Structures are given as structure tokens and as C-alpha cells.
Amino acid sequence: MDTKNVMIVGVGGQGSLLASKLLGKVLLAGGYDVKVSEVHGMSQRGGSVVTYVRFGEKVFSPVIDRGQADLIVSFELLEAARWTEYLKPGGTVIVNTQRIDPMPVITGAAAYPQGLEEAMAAAGVRVDAMDALALAEQAGSAKAVNLVLMGRLSRYFDFPQEAWLQALAQSVPEKFLEMNKKAFVLGAQA
Amino acid sequence: MKQLILGNEAVARGLYEAGCAFVSSYPGTPSTEITEAAAKYPEVYAEWAPNEKVAMEAAFGACLAGRRSFCGMKHVGLNVAADPLFTIAYTGVNAGLVIGVADDPAMHSSQNEQDSRHYARAAKIPMLEPSDSAEALAFTKMAYEISEAFDTPVLLRMCTRISHAQSVVDTAERVEVRKSYQKDIGKYVMMPANARGRHPVVERRTAELIRYAEDSPLDRVEPGRDHTIGILTAGTAYQYVKEVCADTYPVLKLGMVWPLPVEKIRSFAASVDKLVVVEELDGFLESHCRDLGLKCVGKEWFGPIGELSPLAVAARLGKPWSVGPKTQAQIPARPPVMCAGCPHRGLFYTLHKLKLTVLGDIGCYTLGAVPPLAALETCICMGASVSGLHGFSKALEGAADDHTVAVIGDSTFIHSGITGLVNTAYNESKGTLIILDNSITGMTGHQQNPTTGFNLKGDPCAKIDLETLCRAVGIRRVRVVDPYDLRQCEAAVREELAAPEASVIISRRPCALLKYVKHKAPLAVDRDRCVGCKACMKIGCPAISMAAGKARIDTTQCVGCGVCGQLCRAEALKEA
């Protein structure tokens, strides 16, 4: 098989590292060669962040380049629009419709663009939009947006839900496990 | 067992399996997780040293005593440790010594993108460069074999995309290595007479290492179908080449990037029509080829700036590549910012308000240079704020002392700020230094340091008293402020700038992201009181924005620090 590519994008601090760790574990258990590329350090401080997850028979590059992504999971609306050039033709964006203003918008130096979902669709992107924040709050914490979106992502794979939940149990502390499981299941059902 | 782990964690696993017993490092992106992961193995003693020079000297001491040892750092850390590096290149080792250095092409979290390979050549020691986690583990173990076989420290070069990429490794058991220390003055006392004896040993060693490289599986040829092009590459660049070309062209993949083989490269070049060197940053391998009189193409295609990418390689090697759809929308940038509740914010607001000249340093607080505060004007290297303030003051004969300060974090002050402050006191300049003490090494992801009272393993330990330390070097005016209290900050800064001698203000409050910090409830906006004056927006807090002409607080981010409330004359920002 060709190498498949999933990008997880969002705002530093939203929990994309845990999301990519979870996906990486599921893919490894599924028998694939896997590479997961993260960025640490300064950009994690509220900046735009991206994680690359690649899997197949043999994966070389640790990063995904423009035109290569099968799927982009975006934790925030503006970030989804930022990365569309990385999609393959016919690629899909799973997007949390939550809006987080970047500092240039907060200071008034730039405007948060309107109609981003429509603009992405008009550019030929398949947009799978959801209010992940509402579901995360329903699960018990606004911070669980990452698990809600991973739940939604799981629908694009053939792995049984048990495989995801097992990987989740290995990835989060016991005391947060139930809440995170709930968020994942809500995302998978939404 | 197959595991998916970071390149940095794979180095740590390699240290464990190789029997490494001592690790001393200073944190620095992208190298930090090597040492954090090593600390999780009970058989490996691991510590955070105050700086990279101390770490390398400690690791040398441990190898001298007969245990395999390691120190890790980012590329610029190797500048700090260059002093011991160039001389332990002469002494050699007892048990193996491996030095991990992580480069940061594209400067994801660094102040320059220097290429560490030059250090290997300059210090005349071998350097290995893995291209994924499996190689990171294997090369770490091989580095110890080379270190002991050739009596040399060995550099292990990592890069952001290898350090911070998880890929699959197979693990093995640990092998213990113990050697005994033997007194050997001629080998270990590098005074001139002895050092003159050791330099020829170093040159012979390099010649032997070149012979080793000729036969070593570290530098391997991968066959290709099309010999019109042959590619010489290593590390991250190798992965991009394979991504784009698969097995189209033959590839000479180098695992040891210094010293370099001669015959192996010559015969590879002779087997292809055109030699293409694909490497990130400087034309290091390319220079070697040119020194050998080989014609090749390298930096004229790929340039010395930033990261390579599959797309950049494809464009030059004639592989078709199309990019994805772009929307018509104008997408604003999202630069990193100080977190909501960051204790640095109140202090930088004060410096901004007083329109001071601020010499800065390395850490989260470098973000004080970002609008809207834009209150930090220099960032060079660890400690440069303190020593720079002294020179600034002396050059202007004190004329700027009433409106110039330096800012430095707690960990950075311990790393390289203390000596600058000694100079301030000893040579009598009158500047004001502000130590931003957030009780942790923040930017690299919360590492303990000598001011926190805890060691790498999280156990309680001796804690530096910053006030006493500053007084001990000769600064008489030392005071502490709470950066959440704007009035207190402003009064302290005004008073110290007016004082006729050097002073230190310690701005003390723990990082808002620390787990043990108890936060207040988020503030709420009283929409009847809010007049939409945007005074609260001046501090650049990511939790505050404007909606329909009134302030809005994002309650998922706000930690109730109350700094914005002190700016609100309408008293519209209050505890909910």
C-alpha cells in the first residue's frame, strides 16, 4: 500500500500531542510502519502547531508535505484553512468549528476571516465539521476536544473501537481515563 | 518488543542498553527528552547541570572513573561546552563518552541554525547522525563502541525532525560496562608538554577512523536503477530522498558524518554520471567532495537556509508534485504568545508602560518582544542580557541608566547570568537587572533547576537563594516583587532605576502552567460597566478579546490572575 498521511493541526496547548500518540499506538498495533512527527518548544506557547502521522508498509519522511495529506484533523477553524494546501485532491478536513483568535486578531492588526467552512468547500475540500467543544464539555471537560476529534477520526478507519480505547488506556492517567473515553465515544457517535 | 518512540527517547534507550551509567545535560529544544527519558531508567543516574559546560565536564569525569557516560544539549549549547570539547578530544576517554547535540534547522525554537557538524571537524572527533529512531538507538550503542575502540569522545548529531519524530524500534537488554581508573598524567594533564604529545595521537586517530569509515556499515550504498544520478546524503535529508526517489537512484547514505570516507565516496561518484549531495544547512559533505576533487551539485540546488522538504528534493530531481487546494481567505498568522496568567506579562506591561530600553535573554520571556507589549529589544544567547547591560551602561557613561534594564529567567541566570552580574558588581556599572523567577525552566517544557529545590528525578535537594547569591557577588540593592501586582512592580522599577548603584529586582511567581499552582476562578466581564475602551487589551492576553464592542473573556483559558482588572478603570473585570 501507499503511505497514508494524517495531519493533526491546532493551537499550542490544545492537546495535539496526546491525539497523535493515540493514533500512532492504534496504527502500530494494526501492523503498520508508523512515523509521528511533533514540534516542541516555543511554538507550543499558543502558536499554530502541526503533527504529522504517516503509516504504511515502509514510511520514509517524518513530515507530510503540501499535496500529500489524506486527512487533516483541525482543532480550530482558522487552522483548518491554514493547512488545506497539504491535502491531496479529494482530501478531507475534520474540523472543530471552535474559533480561537490569534494575537494579530486580538490586537486588531488582522481580522478573523468569515465563512471559512464555505471557502474550504468552494476550494474543493471535503469538510467534516463538528462542534467538538460542546461534546467535550458534555463529556466533562473543555480540554477533551482532542479526544472528541479522535473519536470522529476513528470513523475513517476500520479498526474496532476497542483498539482505540485500549490505546487510550495506555496513553492517559487513570483518573482522566473515563472522561476521555466518554469524549472519544461522543465524537465517534456524532 | 516493537515500540513507537521519539528519536530522543530512542537515544535514551540506546544509553540504557549500552550500559551508560551517568547522564548530565542542560535542557534545550530539541534535545531535552533524551535526558528526561534516560532519567526513567533506574540503572542510569541522570541530572540537569547548571549549563552545558558543567554537564560535559561532569560526563568526562564519569567516563574517566570507568563508567560509560553521556551529556546532551542543543546546538547552541555546544558553543557553551566547546571549551572542554576541544581538549577532551586530546585526552580521549577511559570508558566511552558520547555527546548528544541536537540541531534545529528552520529554528522552530532557537536563535540561530548553526550546523554542529563543523564542531566534529574542528575538534577532530567522530560524529554519527541517525535518520530515524531505530538508528538513534543503534548509533548510540555504536558510538560507545567507537569511543572505546578509538579512545575518543563521540558526537551524536540529532535534528528536530529526528529528535521529535516517533518511529518504530526494537529493544534489547542492557549490558553493564565497568573499567577501572588508571592514573596517566601524560594522557590526562593537558599542560603544553603533554598536549604536544597528544596532538599527533589525535591526527593518527582521525586517519584510523577514516579507514574504519571505508569498511563500516554505518556508511552504506543503497543500489538504484538509474545511474545518471547518484545521491550522497545523511540524516533527515536521506528520508526525504527515499520518500521522493524510492530506489530510482543509487544512494550513499552516511551514518558517520565525520570523519568521512575517501575511497568509498570516490568509487560511488565514479559509478554515477552526476553526484548530487543532499544535506540540510551547510554544504559540509559537499565541501568534502570538492576537497577530493569530485564534481558535484549540492547547495546551488538546495541552499543553506532552513529545513529541506520532500517537495524541495522532488523539484530538483525532476519528480512531478502537485500541491493541494488553497482557499481565497486571508489567513492571519498565529505566532506563539505568553500564556494566559503568565507571570512575565505584568512585568513586561510595566517595562512597556515606562518606555524602558530592555535587554533580553533566552526563554519564554523572549516573547516580551511580541506585540502588543513589544518591550524587549535584544536576544542573543544565555546570559547576554546581564553582561550586555553592563557594556551598554559603560559605553554611555551611565547616561541611560535611568531607563535601561536587563531581564533574565531563573534558569538562564544560573546558566550564564551569574558571571555577568559579577562583572557588573566588580567593574561598577549601575544598571538594574530583573530576574524573572517563575520557579522552573519554562520554554523547554518544565525542567527543574538549581533555584527550584528539586532535581531531575523530582526529589527535594539544595535550593539556591537568589537574593543571597546576588548580595554575595556585591549587589547591595536586591528586592522581590509579585508580577501580578502592577502597582508594586512599577514602584520597584522606578525606585531601582533612580538608585545610584546597581540593583536586582526578582520578579517572583511560579509559571501558570505548573501543576501545583492553584488558580483563581476565571474573571467575568460586567457588560453593563464595560465601556469598550480596550485598556485590558494592552497586555496581549490570549484569553481577552473584543465582541460587539465589549471585552470578552475566554473562561477556558483565563486563570484569574487579575492583571487585566488592574487596568480597567470602569471596574468591569471581576471575579465571577
Image (cartoon, coloured by chain):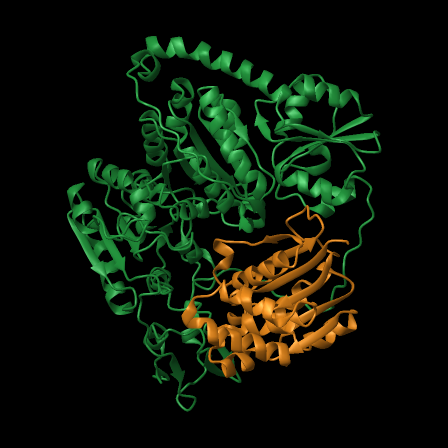
Chain colours: A orange, B green
Where does residue A43 sit, x and y in percent of width and height? 51, 57
Q: Quadrant of residue B228?
A: top right
The residue shown at (30%, 46%) is B413
Between residues B284 and B63, which one lies in front from this camera angle?
Answer: B63
The residue shown at (43%, 43%) is B380
Q: Quadrant of residue B68?
A: top left
Where does residue B127 sit, x and y in percent of width and height? 53, 29
Where does residue B551 sit, x and y in percent of width and height? 46, 81
- For the C terminus of chain B, the quadrant is bottom left
Where is B228 relative to A157, above or below? above
Specify whether B482 is left or right of B23.
Answer: left
The residue shown at (63%, 80%) is A189
Specify whether B193 is left or right of B298.
Answer: left
Between residues A3 and A31, which one lies in front from this camera angle?
Answer: A31
The residue shown at (20%, 46%) is B470
Question: In the rendered picture of this protein, how many numbered marks are placed on residues?
Answer: 0
Q: Is residue A26 visible?
A: yes
Between residues B100 and B494, which one lies in front from this camera angle?
Answer: B100
Between residues B119 and A116, which one lies in front from this camera angle?
Answer: B119
Where does residue B224 sit, x and y in percent of width and height? 80, 33
Q: Is residue B334 visible?
A: no
Where is B257 relative to B455, above or below? above
